[in-house]
Image (tube, grey):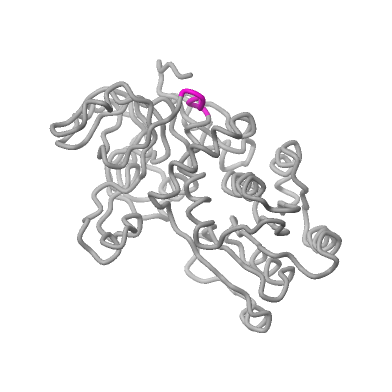
Amino acid sequence: MKALVKTARGPGNLELRDVPRPEPLPKWVRVRVAYGGICGTDLHILHDTFPYWPPVILGHEFTGTVEALGEGVDPAWMGRRVVCEPHSLACGECYLCRRGHIQLCAAKRSPGWGIDGAFASHVAVPAMLLHRVPDSVPDRVAALAEPMAIVLSAMERAPVRPGDAVVIMGPGPVGILAALAARATGAGPVLIVGRDADKSRLDAAGRLGFDTAGDPEAARAWTADATESRGADMVIDASGAAVALALGVEILRRRGRLLAVGMGGRPDIPFPWDLAVTRALDIAFSMSSNYTAWDPAIGMLARHADAAASLVTEFALSDWQAAFRAVEEQSVLKAIIRPDGGASS
């Protein structure tokens, strides 16, 4: 089968190769991939700024159909449309695993960087990590289950409350999915904040009915108007940018909530610590996705399938270079890769 392989360490070293089709281990399954989504992590691996174990097939966000079962797998999985938590090889024995946080296990090796992933026609994964996709959710939408699960996992840490004025920093896929989730779970006014360079993404958010701001002054003005100058109840940062975090702290009300899900790609960034302390802010960080968020994520996508579908642009696996370039240039909001010759709903 054709697969997109990170062949060696270092920037670049990404190429389309012929590799053997995987066979499922005991309690694993083989999935015929319908779509795989390009994540920021894939770009970091391309540029050698995220841990990985080459040679490895990229792609950890995917949906597809179970077509082969390893020993000991429930036969009911055969032929099912599925998505999969990317937590392969979690040890099951450490403190975090025993508390149900396998996504944070130091031993885990997610598809796409630790083990072979889904930028190929087939991928092998543990059956215990699968979630069924209902017929009402098209493949193009199901491909967003992993980033939506990341959003809902974060909102378990810091829930949106009915009527909250919510500001989202960063109009990328996670930011817009966070806005959809916030609105669906009872938020009042929702603003998505970006930069001048984010105009196409902010326009996409506007078409979904969200207020948008392309600079700090517009964000400050919106917040003052929407909250009678009280300040936002909640800021969700999906950017990891120091300037966005500083603005978020500035426009939060006293006892407001800051939820951080974006990564900045550097070990340290400046942060307005004293202002956050004097405002007595609640700050939560979230990484990856909990088991408890996946079925709600699929349900959220089912209820907002049209909006979710509008976020994605499809590329063939053979056009992977154009897909990665489009993501880096932000000419698309979310790129999904279809294996060559694949048929999807």
325 to the left or right of 291: right
Return the x and y of residue 299 as percentages of the image width and height. Answer: 51, 37
Vertical order, 256 against 41 (above or below)? below
Q: Residue at x 48, y 26 (%)?
A: 139
- Identify the residue at image location x=48%, y=19%: 345
Above or below residue 54? Residue 283 is below
Start-end of magenta stretch:
135-140
- From this viewpoint, which residue is outermost toward the front? 162
Image quarter in which the N terminus is found: top left
| Residue 143 image point, x, y percent | 47, 33
Residue 136 lies in the magenta stretch: yes
Q: Main secondary structure of the magenta part?
A: loop
Q: Position of residue 119 (x, y in %)?
A: 38, 32
Q: Nearer the viewer, residue 51 or 276?
A: 276
* 284 relative to 275, above or below: above
Q: Identify the residue shown where x is 40% and y is 55%.
A: 50
Depicted 117 relative to depicted 315: above or below: below
Q: Quadrant of residue 202?
A: top right
- Where residue 260 appears, as percent x and y from the top left, is 55, 62
Tally the marks. Answer: 0
In the image: residue 317, left or right of residue 26:
right
- Please indicate whether residue 47 sits to the left or right of residue 57 in the image: right
Residue 251 located within the stretch drawn in magenta = no
Residue occupying the point 63% across, 75% down: 281
